[in-house]
């Protein structure tokens, strides 16, 4: 490869943190250059890394100046988020205090082992709907984060050694079981569990995704890497493996409510009607229960996020969404939705919405995994052991896309689901449509009024 100055360079590997392949082989296809740079910047969190990758990409295309300008524009999004006063406790007794923060745009992700069942047991009501095994949240509503060892082991490198002997004359073999052969120094391994306490008094526990925090003390800025698994060097002991035991916030932070009461004005509900809320930032389905008063529902564990609302009345679903739609953006999103390879082979776009900065697009989609017999056998659908039949999963979901308005390019980045049910192939797909009435809301402390009566009072 020859750069504009005539110098020859060997292509560099642009493999991402999770093995996304060599990007230099795919410059002419796939997402546009700006989307690629933004994706790598979000994954790596290193300004220099982003700049070097942009330079390598654009040397291949002979467009270095636009890439530098593009990266400089994106660097503003990677500043650190608003810090909070906190104390960080370590397992060796050390305590550090200062201002703690995340990279701007990043969130804490917690995997909850007992987050819900894999699928609903009722094809009609979906009473056992999964609430999501991964929760995302910022530092704002957090009061304290505690860490404790879930399991500790001392390991050593090993391999299986076969000792089987075979006599060619007698054709008799000694089938001795293989044994483990260890070598080298041992090393400590620790699995860490996490418990998060929110200002609302709610507590969730699970395994924290690897996260980088920045603690600014009076002397210097310290980078703290939180992991769910720690591995020590060879020849070290378990006590030598230091870890963070607690992060305690020293300021008040953001006061949030454990539950929000939602009142639907002018809408009646039958006993089998279902309401579901999905948070707007992390697209997480949260528990939504029927309240004591008619037309009232309780939304729990939003952790300070606003949320979308959907209502399932019989075989019809209504989703709160702006009535006005951008037709050009709708056409672009519909084209990308059709070309997106996914488990659900029947995808219907219902509505689109663009973020305020224009860098993200939300799409409301009606999804179904269709069963189809072919000459090579049956494809699609799933086999349900309880029903002893082929079933077709169905979802009503929101998909989030990274958006490049210049090249009209979109890259899928997140999903959230209102309803997840299974149907027999002969059953019809539930109808879904947007509802401007459900979009009109008015917030009153821990109460949300939904309906036309709230219009103009926000």
Image (tube, rainbow, N blue to C red):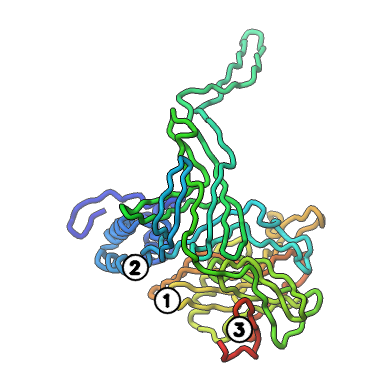
Residue drawn at x 65%, y 83% as measured from the top left: 450
Q: Nearer the viewer, residue 94 or 108?
A: 94
Please provide percent x and percent y for residue 300: 65, 68
Whether pointer 3 and pointer 1 mark residues with C-beta atoms closer than 8 Å, the reply is no
Residue 105 in the image: state x and y as whole percent: 44, 65
- Judging by the rendered image, the residue that carries numbered circle 3 is 441
Up-down relation of residue 125 to residue 220 (above or below): below
- Dot 1 crowding, Cα within 10 Å, few <14, some 14–19, many 20+: few
Disc 1, SS: loop
Q: CA distance from mark 1 to mark 2?
A: 13 Å
Indicate the quadrant where residue 39 lies: bottom left
Q: Are marks 1 and 2 in contact (CB under 8 Å)?
A: no
Chain-order first, disc 3 or disc 2: 2
Image quadrant in which the C terminus is located: bottom right
Of tags 3 and 2, the one toward the viewer is 3
Q: CA distance from mark 3 to mark 2?
A: 33 Å
Q: Mark 3: which secondary structure?
A: strand
In this view, the residue farthest toward the top is: 169
Q: Is residue 104 above or below residue 324?
A: above
Marks 3 and 1, how far apart at CA = 23 Å
Which residue in the structure is indicated by mark 2?
Answer: 76
């Amino acid at each position: 490869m020859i750069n504009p100055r005539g110098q020859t360079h060997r292509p560099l590997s642009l493999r991402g943190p999770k093995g996304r392949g060599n990007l230099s082989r795919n410059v002419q296809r796939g997402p546009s250059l700006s989307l690629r740079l933004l994706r790598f910047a979000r994954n790596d969190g290193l300004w220099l890394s982003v700049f070097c990758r942009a330079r390598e990409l654009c040397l291949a295309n002979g467009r270095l100046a636009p890439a530098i300008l593009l990266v400089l524009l994106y660097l503003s999004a990677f500043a650190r988020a608003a810090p909070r006063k906190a104390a960080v406790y370590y397992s060796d007794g050390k305590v550090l205090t200062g201002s703690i923060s995340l990279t701007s745009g990043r969130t804490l992700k917690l995997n909850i082992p007992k987050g819900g069942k894999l699928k609903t047991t009722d094809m009609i009501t979906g009473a056992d709907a999964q609430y999501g095994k991964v929760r995302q949240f910022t530092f704002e509503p957090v009061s304290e984060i505690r860490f404790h060892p879930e399991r500790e082991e001392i390991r050593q490198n090993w391999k299986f050694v076969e000792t089987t002997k075979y006599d060619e004359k007698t054709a008799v073999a000694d089938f001795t079981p293989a044994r483990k052969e260890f070598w080298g120094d041992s090393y400590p391994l620790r699995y860490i569990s996490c418990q998060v306490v929110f200002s609302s008094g709610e507590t969730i526990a699970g395994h924290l995704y690897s996260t980088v925090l920045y603690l600014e003390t009076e002397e210097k800025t310290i980078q703290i890497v939180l992991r769910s698994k720690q591995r020590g060097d060879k020849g070290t002991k378990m006590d030598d493996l230091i870890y963070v035991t607690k992060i305690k916030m020293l300021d008040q932070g953001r006061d949030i409510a454990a539950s929000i009461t939602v009142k639907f004005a002018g809408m009646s509900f039958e006993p089998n009607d279902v309401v579901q809320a999905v948070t707007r930032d992390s697209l997480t389905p949260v528990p939504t229960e029927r309240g004591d008063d008619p037309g009232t529902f309780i939304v729990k564990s939003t952790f300070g996020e606003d949320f979308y609302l959907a209502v399932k009345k019989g075989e019809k679903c209504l989703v709160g969404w702006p009535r006005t739609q951008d037709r050009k953006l709708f056409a672009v999103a519909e084209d990308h939705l059709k070309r997106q390879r996914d488990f659900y082979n029947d995808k219907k776009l219902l509505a689109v919405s663009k973020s305020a900065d224009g860098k993200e697009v939300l799409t409301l989609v009606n999804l179904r995994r269709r069963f189809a017999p072919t000459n090579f056998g049956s494809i699609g659908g799933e086999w349900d052991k309880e029903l002893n039949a082929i079933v077709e999963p169905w979802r009503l979901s929101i998909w989030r896309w990274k958006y490049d308005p210049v090249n009209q390019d979109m890259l899928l980045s997140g999903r959230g689901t209102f309803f997840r049910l299974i149907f027999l192939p002969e059953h019809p797909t539930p109808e879904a449509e947007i509802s401007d009435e459900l979009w009109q809301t008015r917030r009153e402390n821990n109460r949300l009024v939904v309906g036309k009566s709230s219009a103009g009072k926000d």
